[in-house]
Image (tube, coloured by chain):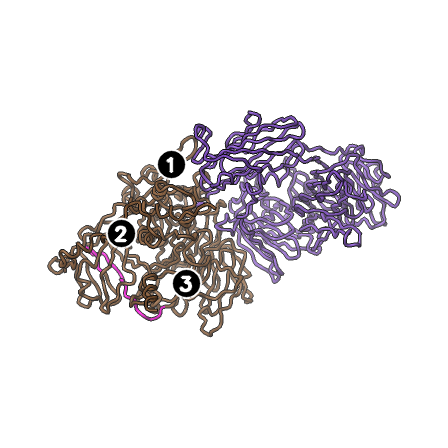
Amino acid sequence: MKKYISLMALLVGFNAFSQEAEESDFYKIITIPTPETMLLEVGGITTLPDGRVALATRRGDVWMVEDPYMRNSNLPSFTLFASGLHEPLGLTFKENALLTAQRGELTKLQDTNGDGRADVYETIYAWPVSGHYHEYSYGPKIAPDGSMFVSGNVAFGDQEWWRGESRVPWRGWIMRISPEGDMEPWATGMRSPAGLGMINGELFYADNQGDWIGSGGIWQIKKGSFAGHPAGLRWADREESPMTVSAKEFFSKVHEEREQVDGRYLKPENNADEKNPEMLYHAKEAVPEITLPAVWLPHGILGISNSEILEIGEDASFGPFKDQLLIGDQGQSKIMRVSLEKVNGDYQGVAFDFIKDFQSGVLRMSWGHDGSLFVGETNRGWGSAGSTTSGLERVVWTGETPFEMQTVKAMPDGFEIRFTQAVDKASAEDLDSYAGQSFIYKYHSVYGSPPINTEKLGIKGVKVAEDGMSVRLVVDNLRQYYVHEINLPGIKSANGSSVLHGTGYYTLNNIPAGAKLNMTEVSTKRSSASKKVAPKKVAAKPAAPKTSANAVLTTEEIKPILAKNTCLACHQVDKRQVGPAYKDIAARRYTAKQIVDLIRNPKAENWPGYSTEMPPMPQVSDEDAMKIANWIISLQEERP
Amino acid sequence: MMKRLTFSLTLWLAAYAGWAQEGYKTLPLNDLSSFKAQAGNWMIVGDVTMDRNLSIHHEAPPVETGKKKKKSKAAPEPEHPVKYTSGQGILLNFNDDQKKDNLVTNWIHGDIELELEVMIPKGSNSGIYLQGNYEVQLLDSWGVKNPGFGDIGGIYRNWENEPAKAYAGKAPRTNAAKAPGLWQTIKISFQAPRFNAAGEKVENARFVFVELNGVRIHDNLEVPRLTGGPINDKEVAEGPLMIQGDHGPVAFRNIRYRLLKPANVSLSGINYEVFDGHFESEKDFKDLKPTSIGSTEQLTWEVAKKDNEFAVKYYGALEIPAEDTYKFSANTGNAMKLVIDGQTISNYYERGGKPVKLSKGTHAIEITYFKYVSWVSPNMGLWVESSNSYPQALHAFSSFPPASNVASPIIVETGNSPRLLRAFLDYNRDRSQRLTHTIAVGDPAGLNYIYDMKSGSVVCLWRGGFIDATPMWHERGDGSFRPIGVVEYLTSKPTLVLAGQSSASLELNNIPDFRSSGYTLDGNGLPTFLYTYRGASVKDKSKLVEEGKVLQREISVENAPAGSQVRIAEGSQIRKLDNGAYAIDGFDYYVELKSAQEATIADKGATKELLVPTTGSVVYQIVW
């Protein structure tokens, strides 16, 4: 029996038998029981003043859920409030009415006779759509002055199926609509703006990786902001437009990479050896209207299809992260956490993983009246992690405080990391407890971007606060505009826990001015240095299995390599997720070289049944790529 | 997020299920010479009208109009619903107690494709007998909720009681009937029973398909026995077409048909050579030795024993039963080359090739199949048809099985109360005329319509099911839906015509200053649509009347400039009938104005419009 247990421990990892904490020790995910035939593909969710939760589904229904908290130990009851809407992707309650963005209009739903069903479906404002599938519309979010913000996806080209285009006015825009139904085009540069957030009266939005969008991220949007996707600039010359840059001016400064051969446009491909790739911050020098993301959410790590942005707010009933932001992700079925600060007048900040393992893609979130978080899910058409295609779940804080980086702030000479619990000073003063790198994304018409210009952080010293609640890290190679990955592999809390999510991604749009630490006040200790000879031996490859580059790894052996290269964000071994299963790739019987080439420059057209394109991944090392390729080939089944 | 990539492999099957237009004959209706002699109840006429409100079971005799201008001085007796004028082009049955023969062609048929238009007055009954033996029922079935074998389009039962002889008939899948007096279209594809040399039946007669008013009502339906009232006492290989003449008046026009025979081509003695590798042309492997060779009884790609990166050359003997022009069609994953008697019929990416004349006897056939694109199916199909046959497969079933990975359809029903659903609508099923702000209103009473909230118009109506939402709700979808059933597209133009406004330049989905205010639902769940347009404000509500068979629309306009009108119909023809109704597009549907205004027919060149002033509410009905 004992033998069996230790074998199990090896197989499943150590969590079950060690003191290591798990997310569910702090945040419980509760699946809301739903009638069997009801398909809750949640496009919008909002909590009503009486505590009920209203859901808009992608099939056009609006459901009222009574007692979703199950306080009375009853199952929640579902009542149909409205139906027949055109793929609504947002829901908000205001003045005894529900507001929702359908594909082609902002609609107000009212129950005027009090029978619990909407009898007025009022068009507040209808906008044009061309009828392209991708022209989804999202919102509304309501500003303090009562105006409503909605956003619209771009369409894609016919021959140029990879190219986002704005076929009719205000696609790829955010619109501001007054309660009286007057529309003001507000800002453009959006590609797939599924996530809107009204944070302390300021508008934010999240976009998804694709053409011109190197990775997902969160942008603050002011009137006239330009977030980066140029399709919407087509309407910049219109009288109503607040934009100061036209499409023509823009493309005179930024290369469109739109070339024709024999009358057919060529799909732009990533050039891994590009000498001077364009980057968003650099383009901003020529096009000052460009708004940089306050926070990049590195693609494949912090999501692949970012969705709703929601503020935790003042309420402490959700744990120690007051005033921070949550951001959902559809493809990875998880929620990330973002802490913003303002430096030189602009928002920037850090993003962390927070809660994963939802049953399906996270599209929408709303706070319940008990401080718990309702999560509306759907993955239809895109695929996601998790076991279902849709549903409604709820996250409840257990009251236990996880050991986390509460926040990371930029300092003139590095970062200050604040913790939720006091650190073990010995671990915190050891520079080997810290690691990290910085990188950035290209700004081009290619689908997505690999992280580029990657450089290890030069961590030179650390100063641990008296109370152990924070540390200041001195980094000698800070790079403005770059994403700085900060890793805490060796940090322990005073009671011996590791950091629950030990990696943060700080977007350093501005380096604050101010006093730098004097190197005399910081610890520069490295535990590895004190062990002098020994560690080298440890670090040297164990003599055991000498694996040649062509040796085929087992699935267990390859998994860390797949995880490191973010492959598992989209692929599973034998089940379709966002991308095809490795077994299905194996069935194509590619050669190892073909697979390596496809990692570098994927061919979305080879996989017509899958809709989310794979970004080029030249950052995967030759060695890793070859190991992955050989492993994939090993999954081939013999033809019967 | 990326666009779905669609690689359209032109599915040859689509053509098979559709309607080939070649080889059709029009049955002349300038006289009755195509038919056997009959008692005189069948005649050739020039124009027919059938008043939808008058039943044939009233006593009055039919009236021939136009001959002598008979000013009716008070007609107390009920009028006969059917009126006609002399002329040509329409076949009309007028039976009475003495004259009531069936009409029988003086030619016979086996396999046949037949299409025609039929007009049936209220309460009448007839039938089309294939080979004189198998009846497709014709009946005034307008508005019947649960159609049976005895309703229009049903395959009629026989009257045998003995279980071994009885045939119970088969109801149409849906009631696709239109109102009395309208032209309805029927398309029938029929395969005759097959007999062996001893005269024993070896295969049942079969309706390959039947369509009524564009709606499939039967597919691949065998008829194991004679139906009621056949011309023969047994099943035969060939027989005449017969139309029932003893049950009531009925009219036909535009009768077209194509007689078919099995092609009976055979492919045998197939030897093959398989080449392993990535080949995009014959040159790529012409110097290579085959990886394997062998012979096979059936044509199939499976001899390659892999599903990608191979080429196979097949050599066989094609047995042609009679000299004729033959057409080959291929559907393959990648590319196929077809050579007959050394002559290239179809090269690589062509899906088939030009028709080729082949003599009776054995011909050498050489088929080269390439497969090198990993993600497409390796399936390979090859069909042949003669000048008068259905296509015949030359490949093994497993080389080109029916697609099994198609999406399960997502069907929306109305249920017990009205159901509304918004989506894009491809007007006239035309993607280039996609309407973007349309809403379907389904009424369980039977008739559904789609309202365009960007133009304030009822763009189509239909009966049958409600909505197929698969195009919108399967995977990402494309935001559009399809009405299920018989659909009548009415207009994509705005209803309100303000005085002094030109409608010539209006674009779909883009009418400047048109602003929807949405809709409200009444206690029954029926919508009233609201909009404003250049100062005018409009309320627009429709409901069903006449037991759900007729749509009545009421439009109230306020603050419109004097002289403004609503457009209640448009068509290539608008004809005012004696009963006050308007027949649109040659009796495609009727419009009946119920409010007191005077309608005018405006001539806009190729189209005519029926316009009504906006003084007071405009109430009209669409009967169809």
Query: In x, y percent, where is residue A640?
Result: 48, 46
Farthest residue toward the right?
Answer: B98
Choose between A242 and A571: the one closer to the eye: A571
Disc 2: host chain: A
For the residues labelled 1 and 2, the Cα–Cα distance comes to 50 Å
Chain in brown on the image? A
Disc 1: host chain: A
Q: Colour of chain B?
A: purple
- Mark number, residue A366: 3
Q: Classify mark 2: residues with Cα within 10 Å, few (<14), some (14-19) or many (20+).
A: few
Disc 3: host chain: A
Residue A399 is one of the magenta-drawn residues: yes
For the residues labelled 2 and 3, the Cα–Cα distance comes to 52 Å
* Residue designated by label 1: A258
* Residue designated by label 2: A545
| Highlighted magenta segment, given as a residue range | A397-416
Query: In x, y percent, where is residue A88?
Result: 48, 55
For the residues labelled 1 and 3, the Cα–Cα distance comes to 41 Å
Residue B611 is one of the magenta-drawn residues: no
Residue A224 visible in the picture = yes
Q: Amino acid at mark 3?
A: Ser
Q: Which element is circle 2 on?
A: loop
